[in-house]
Amino acid sequence: MFREDGASTLWGRSRELGEDGIGATLSGPLSEGEVVSMEISVPIAPHLIKVRAVVRYCNGLYCGFEFLVLSSEQRQTLRRVCESVGTPSTPV
């Protein structure tokens, strides 16, 4: 993420994933409304999805993100990942 004092990187682990967003526990705090760049590792090719997302809610270090813009290829990859792990492809 980019802040007034410079760029920062956080690590996280997701618990929820959908075509429109992701929920993750992070290694540091974020604020609702912040826009971040994300790299999401997925178990199918292309194995890494790079997206921009906005923080919609936070509960401690657990945050829910809404993807801002996805290409049709990224959306299709997310749909396939959700289907392969048996989660509904609905917003987080």
Image (cartoon, rainbow, N blue to C red):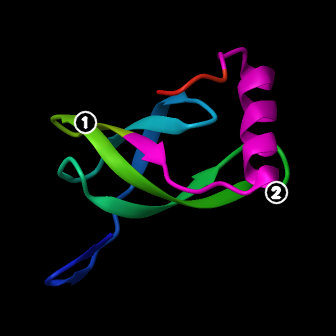
The disc at residue 57 is 1
Find residue 64 and report its image quarter: top left
Task: Inspect the magenta stretch and tell me whether residue 73 lies in it.
Answer: yes
How far apart are the two marked residues, 1 and 2, measured between alpha carbons? 28 Å
**What is the secondary structure assignment of the residue under circle 2?**
loop
- Residue at the spot of label 2: 46
Q: Is residue 43 visible?
A: no
Q: Residue at x 34, y 69 (%)?
A: 9
**What is the secondary structure assignment of the residue under circle 1?**
strand
Q: Residue at x 56, y 37 (%)?
A: 20
Mark 2, Cα crowd under 10 Å, few <14 / some 14-19 / many 20+, is: few
The disc at residue 77 is none
In this view, the residue in front, 30 or 26, is: 30
Q: Identify which amino acid the numbered label 2 is placed on.
A: Pro
Task: Inspect the magenta stretch and tell me whether residue 18 lies in it.
Answer: no
Residue 70: image x %, image y %? 65, 54
* 84 in relation to 27, above or below: above
Residue 42: image x %, image y %? 70, 45
Q: Residue at x 58, y 57 (%)?
A: 69
In this view, the residue in front, 47 or 50, is: 50
* 86 in relation to 6, above or below: above
Q: Is residue 40 visible?
A: yes
Residue 46: image x %, image y %? 82, 57
Residue 83: image x %, image y %? 78, 22
Mark 1, Cα crowd under 10 Å, few <14 / some 14-19 / many 20+, is: some
Q: Quadrant of the N terminus?
A: bottom left
In this view, the residue in front, 11 or 62, is: 62
For the record, the magenta segment spans 65-88
Q: Residue at x 40, y 38 (%)?
A: 24
Q: Identify which amino acid the numbered label 1 is placed on.
A: Tyr
In this view, the residue in front, 66 or 14, is: 66
Q: Nearer the viewer's eye, disc 1 or disc 2?
A: 1
